[in-house]
Image (tube, rainbow, N blue to C red):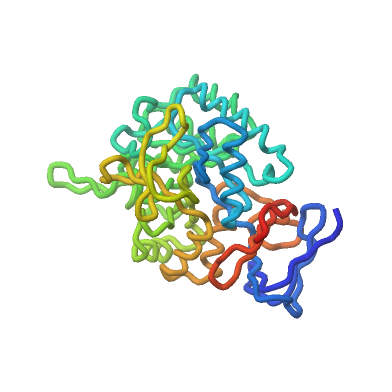
Amino acid sequence: MSKQYLSGKVITPDGIINGSVSFENGLISEVKEGNAENNYYIAPGFIDIHVHGGGGHDFMDGTEEAFLGAAKLHASHGTATLLPTTLTCPDEELFHSFDVLRKVQKDETYGGMFYGMHLEGPYFSSKQAGAQDPKYLKNPTKEHYEAILKKGEGIIARWSVAPELDGANDLGDRLKELGICASMGHSDALYEEVLEAVKHGYTHLTHFYSGMSALVRKRGYRYPGMIESGYMIDSLKVEVICDGKHLPLSMLKYVFTAKGVEKTALITDAMRGAGMTEGKTILGSLENGQECYIEDGVAKMPGGEAFAGSIATTDRLVRNAIAAGATLEEAVKMMTSTPADIIGIKDRGEIVCGKRADFTVFDDEINIVAVISGGKTIYER
């Protein structure tokens, strides 16, 4: 592949420079200062480590069309890398999604976007199920999770689990052994249970504040839950649905300040309704999913008393992070190098020579101009 370059305001680990970045054979070959040819920002490609779908598609639909359709939608909003995320479901449906992911990773245009799978469930607390279908919830057993690990060999990048369940710590040890990010979520755990889970390889909290225990009161005594644990255990990293709905801007600002941008990732947690108009939609697969509806920029469960999921895109996350008090560089870091670090992705997330040529180009309003993934242009305005 011939040498290519981008020129503008390049967001590097050391700051923003006026200059250019060159790349060839899918890798960054040079970053240098100089006269910029335009005023566009050139950021590392945005990385979404928790996303269920978009553009009318859900990864649980189990078709190549759904995977590629959702990828296309999110590429148009700045995403260069994503982790297709599952929901609690029958094992057969989960295993089929593994097969589809392996196929779409070979797609010439969008294949490079699919880093690996994020399993959200089925090992969750029934008290914190949220929009997860409760009939598929269960405790982790070695026989069951080893069967999943075998079917998903090489493509499972992350697994979200409730750490208080019997067998969860053994699973955490196994995930650490395999280099898979062990995350805690949809959990009713108390501080001591979270602390123990950290000793067994759990490093991350899934959609911080959503689907997790807060300060628990028992017979007059107060016990810190998972939310408090996220602040009390310094090593834990967190992710926030930065749509301005799941958490208000004031709370987002608090998270950014308390945990720091090096330990906070922005996620869409987007479902099929991302990029679509208000009205009815489905969370999960068309066959086994749950009906919900889009209103006021978020997906809601029937009755409107609970959220069903986000319809955010990564450009919206960055805008909201800035509105919540983050600098542009901090917002980009939470959308690129921090999520890469959480998952253990070594080859992208920063504009540095030798890293993969992933770039998200945008204007002063975070309107996406172009997205390049692995040296290939996957979106251009």
Which residue is painted at 77% across and 53% down in the image?
A: 26
Which residue is painted at 35% across and 47% down in the image?
A: 210
Q: Which of the 4 quarters of the picture holds residue 30?
A: bottom right
Which residue is painted at 48% across and 42% down in the image?
A: 272
Of residue 92 and residue 363, the one placed in the foreground of this image is: 363
Of residue 136 and residue 69, the one placed in the foreground of this image is: 69
x, y percent for residue 177: 58, 35
Q: Is residue 362 left or right of residue 60?
A: right
x, y percent for residue 323: 43, 69
Residue farthest along the right direction in this orientation: 2
Q: Which quarter of the rendering shows the C terminus?
A: bottom right
x, y percent for residue 93: 51, 25
Residue farthest along the bottom direction in this orientation: 35
Residue farthest along the left direction in this orientation: 220
Seen in the picture, residue 182 relative to 310 is either above or below; the reply is: above
Seen in the picture, residue 36 relative to 336 is either above or below; the reply is: below
